[in-house]
Image (spheres, rainbow, N blue to C red):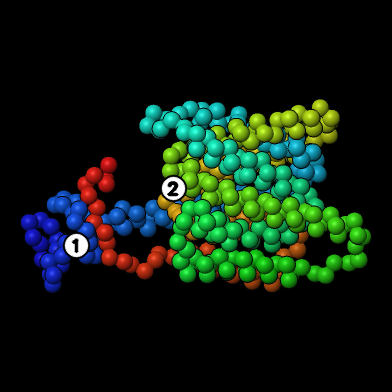
Amino acid sequence: MVLHGTAVCRRALVPICAGCGKPLRGSGMMRGFNICANTLTTPTRNLSAYLLLALSMSLVGSYVALSKPLVAALPVFLLAWLRFGIGGLAMPHWLRKPAGEPALSRATHGLIFLESLLGNFLFSLCMLYGVSMTSAVSAGVIMAAIPAVVALLSWLFLRERIGLRVWAAIACAAFGIGLLALSKPAPAAQSQTLVGSELLGNVLLLGAVVCEAAYAVIGKKLIGSLGPKRITALINLWGFVLMTPLGVYAALRFNFATVSIGNWALLLFYSLAASVWTVWLWMTGLKTVPAAKAGVFTVMLPITSALVGVLVLGEILRGVQLLAFAIALLGLLLATLPARSQPCQAIRPADLH
């Protein structure tokens, strides 16, 4: 039934959303604006955000694994400093303030610094040193804790409600990748020094997990006031500033002639992936996805890290590890399937501007 050009429910004369066909609730519906907020956030838009988040964490996982040969060729402080420097050279134009963007407040400055300190500076040091002391597959096992830590921090600091399905997805991610630990063959007799070094590497990787989770949560706060490109450039600039004293110290004592052309090419990929691509992809996807749900996509980090370790670095992948990946991906599916449809909420014409 149609009343004055507006579709309505035949039974109760309730306005119908022109986009999804469900009853509208709310007093803001006007002729010509009979659509709901759920219609504006289309499945296609969600899918695009999910793809950006998954691609971002897949790139992080790839450079976590590929950083293992880099830390064998370059000192960690020098490697991290070069990464920020190369990334900064790739995006100086992103530092400029867009015309419609508000000026940075003191609180936003503080969040940018924390984002860089935790998500760039400390994450780089913990990850690079940790990977140098253990395997890429072991790094994948430990990084499986990221979704749970992101959800916990989102609940504590962003007051996000975490549904049962997202918790189930987090459990799948942690349990699936945790199977990798059980699938590792029993090591041969090792020296106490080697065992201690691997233990320290695992502790450093746990520190990287906390830093990465904080990065995801702080990013959700920043994306409300800044664009993805400017966030990417600003936190990279702070990372370069923080790392410069240590990087210069390492550079003055290093013989650059020992680095092969292949490692220079790998350094270029690592720098652009870590400083530019992954940050922009993550911040863009985070605009429309809650931090707790976005955290589930960090499961792509350990999966990709372990796969690169197998395909590129020659580590061994067994049947139990394949099962672990399948369970982790099931968690990702749980988090991204459309939620059960709910009655639409009407929007005002002003909401469209």
Residue that appears at 27% across and 42% down: 353
**Rendered-image quadrant of the N terminus:** bottom left
Residue 240 pos. (x, y %):
65, 32
Q: Quadrant of residue 246?
A: top right
Label 2 environment density (alpha carbons within 10 Å; few <14, some 14–19, many ≥20): some
Q: Is residue 84 left or right of residue 107?
A: right
Residue that appears at 75% across and 37% down: 77
Q: Quadrant of residue 226?
A: top left
Q: Determine the secondary structure under disc 2.
A: loop
What amino acid is found at the position of numbered circle 1 in the picture?
Ile
Disc 1: which residue? 16
- Which mark is drawn over residue 174? none
Compare residues 236 and 257 and report the one nearer the observer: 236
Residue that appears at 27% across and 46% down: 351
Residue 107 pos. (x, y %):
50, 38
Please determine whether, in this image, residue 183 is positioned above or below residue 154.
below
Q: Determine the secondary structure under disc 1.
A: loop
Please determine whether, in this image, residue 70 is positioned above or below residue 158.
above
Q: Quadrant of residue 289?
A: bottom left
Label 1 environment density (alpha carbons within 10 Å; few <14, some 14–19, many ≥20): many
What amino acid is found at the position of numbered circle 2 in the picture?
Lys
Residue that appears at 34% across and 54% down: 41
Please determine whether, in this image, residue 132 is positioned above or below residue 228.
below
- CA gap, disc 2 to disc 1? 28 Å
Disc 2: which residue? 287
Taking the image as drawn, is residue 314 in sight?
A: no
Residue 58 pos. (x, y %):
59, 53
Q: Is residue 191 left or right of residue 43?
A: right
Sequence-first disc among 2 and 1: 1
Tell which residue pokes out farthest to the left in this image: 4
